Amino acid sequence: MVRACGLLTHQDQPVALKDISVTLSIREFVAGVSATLHYENEEKVALEAFFVFPMDEDSAVYTFEALVDGKKIVAELQDKMKAHTDYEVAISQGCQAYLLEEDKSSRDVFCCNVGNLQPGSKVALTLRYVQELPLEADGALRYVLPAILNPRYHLSGLTEDSCLDLKTPIVPLENLPYTLTMVATISSQHGINRVQSNCALSPMEYLEGDKTSAQVSLAEGHKFDRDMELLIYYSAVHSPSVAVEMAMPERKPDSLMGDPAVMVSFYPDIPDTETSMICGEFIFLMDRSGSMDTPMSKQDRSQLRIEAAKETLILLLKSLPLDCYFNIYGFGSSFEAFFPESVKYTQQTMEEAVERVQLLKADLGGTEILTPLQKIFRGPSIPGHPLQLFVFTDGEVTDTFSVIKEVKFNSKKHRCFSFGIGEGASTSLIKNIARVSGGTSEFITGKDRMQYKALRTLKRSLQSVMEDISLSWDLPPDLTANMLSPEQTVIFRGQRLIFYAQLTGIVPPEEATGEVCLRCTLQGKSIEQKVTFSLQPKYDSNFTIHRLAAKSLIQTKDMGFRETSARERKDVLNISIESGVMSSFTAFIAINKELNQPVQGPLVHREIPRPVLSARPARASLCSPARVHSSHFAPSGFTNRAACLGTMTHSKKSELLDQAVLQSSSHGQKIKCRSRLESMHHMKKTHSSTYETNLQSNCKGNGIVQLIFLQNANGSWDLNEGLAKVLGMNLEDIKAAHPTKTEDTKKLQSKISSSY
């Protein structure tokens, strides 16, 4: 069943939360965030206010404090059960109390309770956190301040106590009663080229003449009606680096916070070898729950999630290597497979799959992903074809930790590549199912190029990966580096690696240096990268590196209330309390005992409205394609920009994939999908207009992707007007250049090459 996460309130009902102000400090690839929530009780009765909000899975929350009538009250991080008890006792005694906690079911949902807010009183609650920023394919660092928190689906019979069970009012985005302000300061020793955003920003202002620091802010009057995204472009992002942070002075040595912490960043220079894997079992798991029938974002004419996912799935189907195996599952409250078991990739099976994908609807109810995952993992393996799992979902589930645990348990037999579709997708689910299985994750919102992210992921699944990863340290005597990060099993080309370690022993004088070396193997060949660094620790009042290291440790052990063993729970609790970083088993609590006024009658509850993307009628889809029966324009196979007219091989097909990834990423933030799909109810095979033609129009400006949409399973193309249009040539001219004639073949090859 789907439980409502809130009922619409009267629009004139007083709301305690007035505005949210965010101060963002980005240094290199780490963000430090201070978010302040301003509350004011304009009613004549005491209130207890609740605010449920999303936050990125990788956020390490380490401070929570309240400013009440000019007095600052710093919250204490406690065992969650004790914090809840203390909160209830404080409220009953007439004290003001404030509680901040993670949701039990997912690490990317938080709840803030404001208890006993007196009439006319104002309170400012501030939380601070740090997080690593992911590196995009085009070299941008991506920071997202989530705003959209979509209702999460509850499994039937599951009675997990969740923040999402609060009856928080859901209001249209334009009717939110609070606003957001944000000021971002960015600094990098490599220099800052530019900053882009999906929201209106003030002009970027450089604070230094060498462009190593800059400041931007949100335009005035911004409504917190969408995820706020910043893309930061430095002059260089691929240089290895090491930072050493001073220990907390009051902590004892040989403890997590009592020794210097080290953050090591590598961007391995992996040779661009020819893709070696031409086999594999590719299973695509497509979310067909009702929530997939909502828009990708609030942007005008935003595409439906299910339609964006279908387009991307067709693109991937066209790009698979010949003779691999594949299958497609759709899931909701139940699940359906295209084939009883995975089938060999041929022209016939590819065509059948494409036709069935075009007919898919978001009509399977809730979001129960665990059952189809178990069915896939328990199926027979195909010798010589390793399992590669692609998951497309908006991540609106509450059994997040159960799903992560299942994927982790089967991580030896597969890799999972996950796609979070639309604003509000669960970062906890999407990131972790990829993380625990050695895959990668991507998030697709309205302005993203879904195609290039999908093609980049497919390319990675076909790559030979770096294995046997190890770090070695060259340090002075009496100094040792102890790893805090979990073991890294594989590295993909274009992927950044971050490690955390602890220095124990005697730190030498300022001039001393150390060296760290990353070693790994690629196709049996050893590769190494070294970096020399100063051993002198630097002071950081926020202890950013220590807290990021603690968060990394917590993520490897914390699987939520129901899925974490007693031993791991104890470890998580100890790490969380010592580092001050919140976990599933801890919560921040602050109590203002000076108020101490008896509560007259019960407190009035006020749940703070939150934005949600509302469903709307599905857009129309085009008719299914009628096969064009003409001679194949595959004089043994037309391959890529170079149009090599030889036998189509997997390596040539992968070259086209490479070109698509490169060309798509270069257009990444500039091209907006303009899908206008007609009703699936009117789909008839006899219609001459094709779904694939419509897909091409969505990728206008990227000829390589358009070519992939037209491609046959063996890499050839049908010679027709559609192909001629993509090539920018006349169909009759192409037919005249008969490929059996060597000279004409060369001319055709030259023409196709010059067209790109």
Image (tube, rainbow, N blue to C red):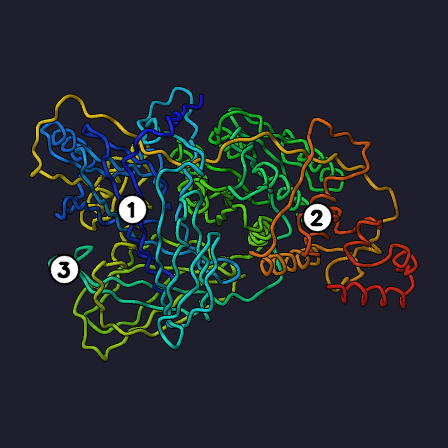
Cα–Cα gap, marks 2 and 3: 62 Å
**SS of the residue at dot 3?**
loop
Cα–Cα gap, marks 1 and 3: 21 Å
Q: Earlier in the sequence, mark 1 or mark 3?
A: 3
Q: Position of residue 254 (x, y in %)?
A: 16, 58
Residue tagged 3: 253
User: Residue 245: x, y in percent?
Assistant: 24, 65
- Please say if 675 is above or below 684: below
If the image is split into quadrants, where does the C terminus sit?
A: bottom right
Determine which residue is flagged by label 2: 697
Q: Locate residue 501: give its quadrant.
A: bottom left
Q: Is residue 512 above or below residue 179?
A: below
Q: Which residue lies at the image location 19% right of the left edge and 56% below the top edge?
A: 257
In the image, what residue type sits under mark 3?
Pro
Q: Amino acid at mark 1?
A: Ile
Residue 371: x %, y % from top left: 49, 28
Observer-side mark, 2 or 1, equals: 2
- Who comes first in sequence, dot 2 or dot 1? 1
Mark 1 element type? helix
**Which residue is at the far bottom?**
511
**Mark 2 belongs to which amino acid?**
Ser
Q: CA separation, marks 2 and 1?
A: 45 Å
**Mark 2 secondary-structure assignment:** helix
| Disc 2 + disc 3, Cβ < 8 Å | no
619, 284: nearer the viewer:
619
Q: Quadrant of the N terminus?
A: top left
**Residue 518: x and y, percent?**
40, 66
Residue 127 position (above or below residue 291): below
According to the picture, the residue beneath numbered tag 1 turns out to be: 554
